[in-house]
Image (cartoon, grey):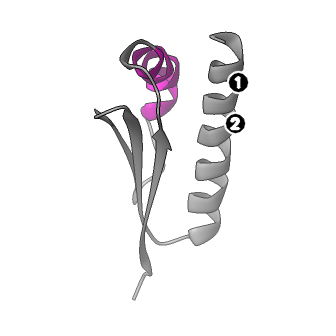
Amino acid sequence: MLPKCQIEIAINNISKDKAKVIEKALEPDNVNFPQGLSLEIKEKENQLLFSFSSEGDLKKLISTVDEVLEHVNLSMEVIK
């Protein structure tokens, strides 16, 4: 049986404009995910929510979360 895991990360106190920029910056990375791995990004009440879901290799999930957060951090630095 493959392990199932979900990780939810929220960036709080973010403006709609900054959230949209970050979402757009991540669009190219949010395609062709490995099988069993998914990412959903939502904007809600001054929050940007990331929902990662995985069935299988937890190392891939951790690596993907790390990579997405690196891209988010870079995007936030650029739009300061």
Left or right relative to 38: residue 57 = right
| Predominant secondary structure, magenta span | helix
Depth check: give the residue in front, 52 or 17. Answer: 17
Percent coordinates x, y for residue 78 in the rendering: 69, 12
Tell me the amino acid under the disc marked 2: Glu
**For residue 9, above or below residue 70:** below
Asked if residue 42 lies left or right of residue 9, the reply is left
Residue furthest to the bottom:
1
* Residue situated in front as seen by the camera: 48 or 51: 48
79 vs 23: above or below: above
Q: Quadrant of the C terminus?
A: top right
Q: Quadrant of the N terminus?
A: bottom left
**Mark 1 element type:** helix
* Mark 1 closeness class: few <14, some 14–19, many ≥20 residues within 10 Å: few
Q: CA distance from mark 2 to mark 1?
A: 6 Å
The residues colored magenta run 18-30
Residue 11 within the magenta-colored segment of the rendering? no
Q: Which residue is mark 2?
A: 70
Q: Give the residue drawn at x 71%, y 19%.
A: 77
Percent coordinates x, y for residue 63 in the rendering:
66, 54
- Out of 78 and 2, give the one closest to the viewer: 78
Task: Give yes or no for contact between labels 2 and 1 (Cβ–Cβ under 8 Å).
Answer: yes
| Horizontal side, residue 51 vs residue 60: left or right | left
The spot of residue 21 in percent (x, y) is: 47, 14
- Which residue lies under the disc numbered 1? 74
Q: Amino acid at mark 1?
A: Leu
